[in-house]
Image (spheres, rainbow, N blue to C red):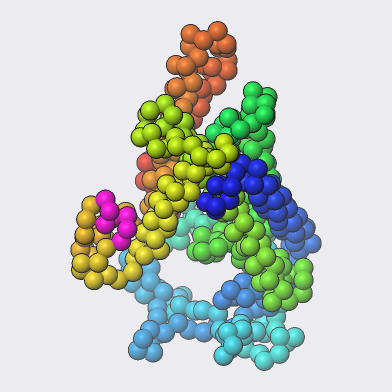
Amino acid sequence: MAYIAYRGVNGTTAVNMAVNIIQITALLVFSVIAIAYRVQHKQGSTGFHLSNGVAVNYVVAQDTVKDDKGNPTPVLDANNKPTMDKDGKPVYQMTDATDKDGIPVPADKDGKAVTDPKLAAPFTVSYAPEDAITGKAGDDKDPQTFNFHSTAGSVIAPHSFNFVFIQACIAILILVGFESVTAMGEEAKNAKRDIPRAVLLSLAIQGIVCYLIEYFAANYLLHNGYTIPNAAASGAPVGDMMVIVGTWLFGSYAAGKAFMLVQAATVFLALIGTTLACLNTGARVTYAMGRDNEVPSHFACCMGARSRRIARSGRWQSSPLSSALLRWRFTSGVPRQRHSTNIASGIAFGIFSPETYAKLPNTLVIITLISNFGTFLLYMMTCVIAIVAFREHHMFNGFKHFVVPVFGLLANLACMLFYLIGPFTVSGMS
């Protein structure tokens, strides 16, 4: 990535153009297939569900979960006591049965295992409202759970104030990056015309294609075969959905998994585009700061063609730091000797014991959460700066340079506060 950035802005633009075309096409393909799956599978029809990661369209036999001593594992209630059925017998945890090859074992209508999938009871799709929301609000033993959307309108309808705020925070974070366009102002042939257009176009592409369409399609696909709790427990929920729709469309689980892997490859390409954008932005910002003597002058060192010399710092300064952070992430959680260290903590603080290291922010999730909080702060302060910068400028416009920034300031401040308050008010939010 650093080499592409070093070669110049034209090469970066060509790579990002190709990446965006491939990624957006992949998103639209999945969205169309997901919506088609929901339309084609009416209430009560035979559909697919995931069992041990395999997409099947039949009922799967159940096995009792056993502990390391071979004893059945009971289902525990909120008081950590075994749950009893209506006859006073303990209820045991059950799991989908698999054969020696890891393929789910089919079952007949009575739940008994059969050897021939043709004899198995078909899996019935349900979008019924009584299945969509289960449990009771405020009940510890049977808490209310939102499983899926029973109608298309439910996907886009607000369900609670907290959920609306969660979506607002997600939307803002998904739209992050549009301001990176402004870093390319010096290379643009007509910056005054094209940079504002590029900012608005990037927002439209991210907001409409990569968020609204994909969000609707993924949520509309959910049903009793793949619920929101299933998605929450998965490391790759959209990947699971791709396996389901791919198996349906192409006729086999192997083809469905291949479809998912092809889509995953486009995500990898998207990371290339994101990395290039970050390197170019970082290089150009530090170049401008070095030129203005805000940072050491070597950041403004120029060699060769202009489009290459600015990006030079992206190769030699941003890349090693990124690599160090990556190593930090991938080595976190690995058992260490007492005097071992990693790049990030070793450089900053010296050598830690494993006990001390475990108390430090050492996972990508924590880094991401801190970064997201900082993003809200950054955009909020940008709104403040916009108000101050244009207050006495001859181009000042009350709506553009006061009303809009104030709205942005308050919106980001609200998201920051909800980031802190939300975990105490929304069940499952962390």
* Count of numbered tags: 0
Closer to the camera in the image, 232 or 203:
203
Q: Is residue 425 visible?
A: no
Residue 226 location, quadrant = bottom right
> Looking at the image, is 390 positioned above or below residue 71?
above
Residue 153: image location, x then y, percent? 69, 45
Residue 240: image location, x then y, percent? 61, 66
Residue depicted at 48% across the width and 49% down the height: 315
Residue depicted at 62% across the width and 56% down the height: 269
Q: Is residue 81 visible?
A: yes
> Looking at the image, is 181 positioned above or below residue 263?
above
Residue 207 location, quadrant = top right
Closer to the camera in the image, 375 or 304:
304
Residue 262: image location, x then y, percent? 67, 65
> Looking at the image, is 260 positioned above or below residue 301?
below
Is 409 covered by the magenta stretch?
no
Q: Main secondary structure of the magenta part?
A: helix
Residue depicted at 71% across the width and 85% down the height: 117
Closer to the camera in the image, 372 or 168:
372
In the shown orientation, is residue 372 left or right of residue 212? Answer: left
Is 347 covered by the magenta stretch?
yes
Please provide the residue range marked out in magenta: 342-348
